[in-house]
Image: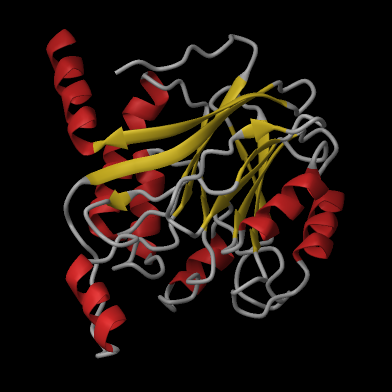
């Protein structure tokens, strides 16, 4: 499995896309050593929006991600599906709510975490407004948050959890030159538009899903098809097979905060197992 070399003077930041169900959670936790060693990730951000049976995140799942080595966690429209997570959102410093949620909604509007080299990185989450639940203006919210971040924190990553590509592209252009990366989540389908804008901001409409790909957006195929064809309501349970990790990594200059490279990541469960076995043999 080939992996790109990281320049010694750059910071590599990885955003792992929507983690779906137990299979997705298991894979991302198991893959952290690969992300650090083979990919060279200095900072790992995970959107854990769908970890709890496809909707939300539990406190135990949060703790498992952090214990595995994940640096920061973003969420989205399913943020409060598991009510218990409100306590974690209030107490922990590395998990955020969408910044354009109401001020009194549980959670922090951004967080600042550090790479293993001690370099600070600000993490922001925003919720789109097209075909999504009613929320405050994301442009006003992100401007407010950016104004509150210390000037010395040059590396800034924004997870835009949105349905419409137009929503994400507007935010990307708005933030060009103001943040290191604007990366989209929510649709569970990776897009092929990764690029660096003129102002030095890396952008991609959606980094994809981490979970079972023998599915419809992570859910078992037959119940979804049946409801689509007949309108007969079914429980859309999370699928189990063909588990893959999708995400996007960005290299950035810590002296300027600008992105220098961006690429999609797609890791199959069997590829990770092969790497683990080879690593164990080499010890």
Q: Is residue 258 above or below residue 100?
A: above
> With 214 as the anchor, is 104 left or right in this view?
right
Q: Is residue 123 above or below residue 272?
A: below
Q: Nearer the viewer, residue 70 or 22?
A: 22
Question: Residue at image x 39%, y 50%?
Answer: 209
Residue 63: which quarter of the image? bottom left
Q: Nearer the viewer, residue 101 or 116?
A: 101
> With 30 as the anchor, is 260 left or right in this view?
right
Question: Residue at image x 80%, y 40%?
Answer: 176
> With 92 as the anchor, is 175 left or right in this view?
right
Residue 281: which quarter of the image? top left
> With 280 as the anchor, is 126 left or right in this view?
right
Q: Is residue 228 above or below residue 190?
A: below
Residue 208, given in percent of the width and then of the height, sits at 44, 48
Q: Nearer the viewer, residue 173 or 105?
A: 173
Question: Residue at image x 68%, y 72%?
Answer: 101
Q: Quadrant of the C terminus?
A: top left
């Amino acid at each position: 499995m080939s992996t790109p070399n990281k320049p010694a003077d750059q910071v590599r930041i990885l955003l792992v896309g929507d983690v779906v169900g137990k299979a997705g959670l298991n894979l991302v936790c198991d893959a952290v050593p690969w992300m650090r060693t083979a990919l060279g990730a200095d900072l790992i951000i995970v959107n854990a929006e769908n970890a709890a049976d496809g909707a939300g995140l539990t406190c135990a799942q949060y703790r498992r991600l952090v214990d595995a080595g994940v640096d920061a966690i973003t969420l989205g429209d399913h943020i409060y599906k598991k009510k218990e997570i409100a306590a974690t959102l209030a107490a922990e410093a590395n998990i955020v709510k969408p910044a354009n949620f109401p001020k009194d909604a549980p959670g922090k509007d951004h967080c600042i975490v550090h790479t293993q080299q001690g370099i600070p990185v600000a993490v922001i989450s925003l919720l789109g407004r097209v075909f999504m639940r009613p929320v405050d203006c994301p442009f006003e919210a992100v401007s407010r948050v950016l104004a509150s971040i210390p000037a010395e924190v040059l590396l800034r990553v924004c997870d835009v959890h949105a349905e419409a590509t137009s929503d994400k592209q507007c935010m990307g252009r708005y933030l060009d030159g103001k943040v290191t990366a604007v990366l989209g989540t929510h649709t569970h389908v990776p897009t092929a538009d990764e690029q660096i804008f003129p102002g030095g901001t890396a952008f991609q409409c959606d980094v994809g899903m981490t979970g079972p790909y023998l599915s419809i957006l992570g859910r078992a195929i037959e119940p979804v098809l049946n409801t689509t064809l007949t309108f007969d309501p079914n429980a859309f349970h999370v699928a189990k097979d063909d588990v893959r990790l999708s995400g996007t990594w960005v290299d950035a200059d810590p002296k300027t905060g600008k992105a220098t490279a961006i690429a999609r990541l797609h890791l199959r469960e069997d590829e990770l197992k092969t790497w683990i076995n080879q690593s164990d043999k080499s010890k």
